[in-house]
Amino acid sequence: MKDIKLYTGSNCWFCEQAKQLLTRENLPFENINLDDKLELRMQLSKENGGYRTIPMIFIDGKFIGGFNELNALVKSGDLKS
């Protein structure tokens, strides 16, 4: 099983969509809310090419991007393989 971590925020439509997608696909994930973790959010951004939006999604420790990238992986079947 893949290790999936979602770094999210409150009132974020894309964050909610990512969580719903993973839940529908029966893929367990860890949700880390960044609302009160500004330093962590800045560190993640710096370490991943300046990516600043949420969700920030990591699979097996590798940054894959946000909701659109996650959705593409699910649709292609690559996430379950």
Image: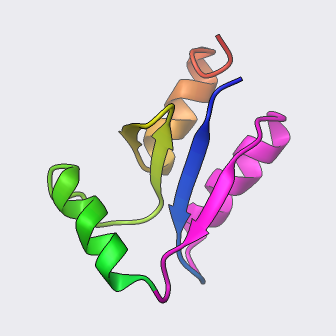
Which residue lies most toward the bottom here? 36
Q: Would you place residue 23 above or below residue 39 in this image?
A: above
Q: Would you place residue 28 above or below residue 51 in this image?
A: above
- In the image, is residue 22 part of the stretch drawn in magenta? yes
Q: Would you place residue 58 above or below residue 37 in this image?
A: above
- Residue visible at 57% across and 15% down in the picture: 78
- Residue visible at 60% across and 22% down in the picture: 79
Q: Would you place residue 73 above or below residue 4 in this image?
A: above
- Residue 27, percent from left and from top: 76, 35
Residue 53's quadrant in the figure? bottom left
**Total numbered circles:** 0
Which residue lies most toward the top here? 81
- Residue 11, percent from left and from top: 60, 83
Q: Nearer the viewer, residue 23 or 31?
A: 31
Query: Residues in magenta?
Result: 11-36
Side (left or right) of 32 relative to 39: right
Residue 44's quadrant in the figure? bottom left
- Residue 3, percent from left and from top: 61, 35
- Residue 81, percent from left and from top: 64, 10
- In the image, is residue 80 part of the stretch drawn in magenta? no
Residue 42's quadrant in the figure? bottom left
